Amino acid sequence: MAAFPSSWSMTRPYLFLLMIIATLSPPATADICSFWDSGCVDPLAQTAISFTFPPLFLETINFFYAFDADVRGKGQEPMTKAAFWIGYEPYVNNSVIDLNRTSEIAVRVGNLTGTPSGGNNGCDGVWGSECSKNMREFFQQTLFDLVTLGEPFSDPLSTVIGSFHTNPPVISNCPPQFFENQHFPVDQFGIEIDTNKTPIIKTTGSAISPWFSWFIDNMTASEQAEQVAVGIISRTPSYGSAPPSNKYGIGIELVCAQAPSPGSSGSDD
């Protein structure tokens, strides 16, 4: 039987090593999220805002907002993809669970520019402290009215925001176009159960697994970088639970974030 050439015997170990590497290492493209994949986002820009959500969460939690862009979109017009999620350590205060409650976050992006800064997790710098105060109380009152009405509902914040599509409300000292937005997604992230004092908390999100992403037509990356993402976070009694004595028993937090594109002023977290 003929012997293998000496050149083969010298290169064979290296070929074997390359085969192992090729098998264990995924293709480079596997780590890249396609612009059209709504289940992830490859951020052109991303930012995070820390805020507190007492009394349920014991630690600060982070609101993440990110976007990607395509210069052609569906045809010749530009398009962006916005996404959000919350990051947190799931440490909660079980002692405050005395009702069945639902925690949700609603986010709107578009038709609102400004510079997040100051109180109410940056929102005061966008529209002023009076708007922040009025918006918080508006959502507290609207959710309080829902839970005391007695009619069935599922996710309370999603229910009230869904009702704004046909009749957008106007909040004093706030941008009049605030509720006139094509997309206003709402996501549930916490359910408190009174019987066993144990909450069900949604798994923290990430760019590869955002809680929600959506496409915005006719928006360039530079235009998206100017937009302010507004998050409205609520903690409301679930249907069938005893309502609070007044609207202040409804938990509401506001958060405003901006993700500037590369090369613009500001920094991405």
Image (tube, helix red, strand yellow):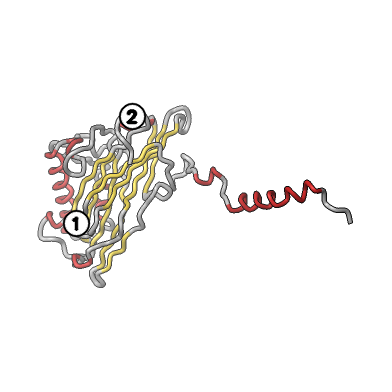
Extreme residue toward the left, this view = 245
Give the label, 2 or 1, closer to the camera: 2
Q: Which mark is residue 54?
A: 1
Q: Which mark is residue 264?
A: 2
Above/below status of 20 relative to 225: below
| Mark 1 Cα shell of 10 Å, populated few (<14), some (14-19), many (≥20) | some
| Quadrant in which the N terminus appears | bottom right
Q: Are marks 2 and 1 in contact (CB under 8 Å)?
A: no
Query: Which residue is at a point 33% across and 29% down the rendered structure image?
Result: 264
| Quadrant in which the C terminus appears | top left
What amino acid is at disc 1? Pro
Query: Which residue is at a point 41% across and 50% down the rendered structure image?
Result: 209
| Mark 2 Cα shell of 10 Å, populated few (<14), some (14-19), many (≥20) | few
Name which of mark 2 and mark 1 comes first in the sequence. Answer: 1
Where's residue 192, x and y in %?
26, 64
Extreme residue toward the top, this view = 76
What amino acid is at disc 2? Ser
Above/below status of 202 relative to 72: below
Q: Provide the secondary structure element on which disc 1 rests.
A: loop
Q: Is residue 239 visible?
A: no
Q: Is residue 91 left or right of residue 137?
A: right
Above/below status of 201 relative to 42: below
Q: Provide the secondary structure element on which disc 2 rests.
A: loop
Where's residue 141, x and y in %?
14, 51
